Image (tube, rainbow, N blue to C red):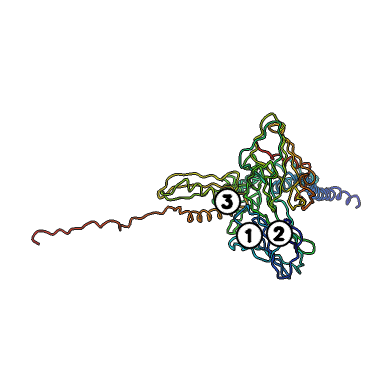
């Protein structure tokens, strides 16, 4: 069992008939092991900004029985290891600035956008994926030019923080640095930003903070953007190590289609 | 004797064998060609279009070989075609409905208003498309019954395809008491939509005042959801509205029926004749 630290992921040993609990931000998670099955219970706190962090404790956090999600996974014989891995959401996240945000012509900036991690639970001799739970259930949204072309995404509000020190450090959130260059001759109004989360990896720095690759957007004119993502962890994440790989492989053909609507004017 | 047999063989057996050989070759050629052509084109077609193309191609190729075989037997194709034309007219008159369904089916397959698995509303029925055939479309209703709708009926009727677009809007009609503050109700309803994770943030939920009804103010909350979560959203959001209205003391309208209890009954005076 791991001791208390910002690093809530990893492999934990659960004894037979033992139940362990995690509080990771607004998520309450309970994992119980029997000789032939695993039982997983989860619930969400109403406070979406909660920065709770309790790792593998035997004390129940007090679930709300009305909204409890309960799942059972049968095995021929369970083994003690249960692995928790932070992964990114299964859809892109569309972030809208809380206040109108503009980038003047020929300027550039770096925004720090965070997204709630999901937890992948793996058990069994071959580390089978049992379940994936978001640490915060975001609202759905539609991202496209009209109501029949586009993608279903998750919605979030962003403060478009330009200073890393302003960003509240919450253990369950993954930060993506987005560097935007406005190479055009006019001011770029930023109405919403689509983070292509299924194509990004998660890295953990030396303090246990989670990061994705940096995204670089070059806005040339009204219709032309070029979007690239850095290889590996961003430079500001010191001594970062890879925690989880992207859900989807980024191919050159889908690079532009995925990122095309990154910025909306 | 030998020459006589040879003559018979040359006159009768040889054309028959040749005709049989042509027909067998025709059957296999039609099958091989049809399969390979449809395999090449199937990526660009729906299963219904592929099935139609396969049948048309198969029978067309087979007909060519049959015509060739008939010619080998010494029949004149032109005379046969004339007879076939008359027969076709006779069959056509006798099977008008079927032909109409087939032609409607071909148009439907070409037009593609729905695909197998889509949820549709048509002629007062709602269900999932199970198969699209040349004569009819079969749908499974929510109470698990099979309904066969002739293609002719479908082509004449409006079809509502509930699965065509990935997102749908739910228009929830809500009535509240005349005494209620509409601005407060608007804030409560939009707040509920914002909190429900299945309600899309964009397109944004909308609130409308539809008018003043007999017993209350008629309102509408329009929320968008993904096609897969539409029913779940409709149920959950209406439960949340009911709970929020109870908590916020927002009254639903109620019809008041006059029972006569609030006023005194009309006085009745019995008049009698003088002296009686």
Q: Nearer the viewer, residue A230 or A194?
A: A230
Pointer 2 residue = A131
The chain carrying label 3 is B
**Residues under labels 3 and 1: Cα distance?**
16 Å
Say left or right for A40 vs B152.
Answer: right
Give the image location of residue A242, x and y in percent.
79, 51
CA distance for labels 1 and 2: 14 Å
> Which image quadrant is residue B235 in?
bottom right
- Element on which disc 2 rests: strand
Element assignment for label 1:
strand
| SS for callout 3 | helix
Chain identity of mark 1: A
Mark 1 and mark 2 lie on one chain; the one further toward the N terminus is 1
Residue A225, given in percent of the width and then of the height, sits at 72, 35
Look at mark 3 in the image and give the residue it sits on: B195
Q: Pinpoint residue B88: horizontal percent, then vertical percent.
A: 66, 45
Q: Which residue does the numbered mark 1 point to in the structure image? A: A43
Mark 3 is surrounded, within 10 Å at the Cα level, by few (under 14), some (14 to 19) or many (20 or more) other residues, namely some
Q: List x then y, in percent, for residue A197.
A: 71, 47
């Amino acid at each position: 069992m791991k001791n208390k630290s910002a690093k809530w992921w990893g492999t934990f040993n659960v004894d037979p008939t033992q139940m362990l609990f995690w509080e990771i931000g607004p998520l309450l998670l309970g994992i119980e092991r029997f000789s032939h099955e695993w039982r997983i219970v989860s619930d969400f706190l109403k406070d979406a900004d909660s920065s709770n962090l309790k790792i593998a404790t035997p004390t129940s956090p007090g679930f709300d029985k009305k909204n409890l999600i309960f799942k059972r996974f049968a095995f021929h014989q369970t083994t003690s290891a249960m692995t928790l891995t932070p992964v990114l959401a299964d859809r892109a996240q569309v972030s809208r600035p809380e206040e109108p945000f503009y980038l003047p012509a020929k300027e550039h900036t770096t925004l720090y956008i965070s997204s709630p991690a999901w937890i992948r639970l793996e058990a069994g001799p071959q580390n089978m994926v049992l379940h994936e739970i978001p640490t915060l259930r975001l609202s759905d949204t539609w991202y496209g030019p009209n109501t029949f072309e586009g993608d279903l995404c998750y919605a979030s509000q962003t403060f478009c923080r330009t200073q890393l020190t302003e960003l509240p450090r919450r253990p369950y959130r993954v930060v993506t640095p987005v560097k935007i260059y406005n190479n055009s001759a006019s001011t770029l109004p930023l109405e919403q930003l689509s983070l292509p989360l299924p194509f990004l990896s998660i890295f953990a720095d030396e303090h246990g903070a989670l990061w994705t690759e940096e995204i670089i957007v070059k806005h040339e004119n009204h219709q032309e953007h070029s979007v690239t993502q850095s290889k590996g962890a961003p430079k500001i994440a010191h001594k970062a190590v890879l925690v989880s790989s992207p859900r989807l492989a980024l191919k050159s053909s889908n690079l532009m289609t995925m990122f095309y609507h990154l910025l909306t004017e | 004797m030998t020459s006589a047999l040879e003559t018979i063989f040359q006159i009768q057996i040889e054309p028959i064998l040749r005709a049989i050989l042509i027909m067998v070759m025709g059957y296999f050629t039609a099958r091989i060609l049809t399969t390979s052509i449809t395999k090449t084109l199937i990526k660009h077609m729906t299963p219904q279009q592929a099935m139609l193309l396969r049948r048309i191609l198969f029978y067309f190729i087979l007909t060519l070989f049959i015509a060739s075989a008939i010619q080998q037997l010494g029949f004149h194709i032109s005379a046969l075609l004339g007879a076939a034309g008359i027969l076709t007219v006779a069959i056509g008159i006798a099977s008008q409905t079927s032909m109409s369904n087939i032609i409607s089916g071909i148009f439907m397959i070409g037009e593609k208003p729905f695909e197998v698995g889509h949820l549709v509303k048509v002629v007062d029925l709602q269900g999932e498309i199970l198969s699209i055939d040349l004569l009819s479309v079969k749908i499974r209703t929510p109470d698990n019954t099979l309904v066969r709708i002739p293609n002719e009926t479908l082509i004449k009727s409006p079809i509502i395809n509930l699965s065509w677009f990935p997102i749908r809007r739910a228009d929830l009609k809500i009535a509240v008491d005349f005494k209620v503050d509409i601005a407060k109700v608007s804030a409560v309803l939009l707040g509920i939509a914002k909190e429900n994770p299945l309600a899309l943030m964009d397109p944004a939920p909308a609130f409308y005042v539809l008018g003043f009804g007999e017993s209350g103010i008629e309102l509408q909350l329009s929320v968008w959801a993904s096609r897969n979560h539409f029913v779940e959203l409709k149920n959950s959001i209406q439960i949340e509205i009911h709970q929020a209205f109870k908590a916020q003391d927002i009254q639903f309208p109620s019809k008041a029926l006059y029972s006569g209890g609030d006023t005194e009954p009309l006085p009745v005076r019995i008049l009698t004749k003088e002296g009686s």
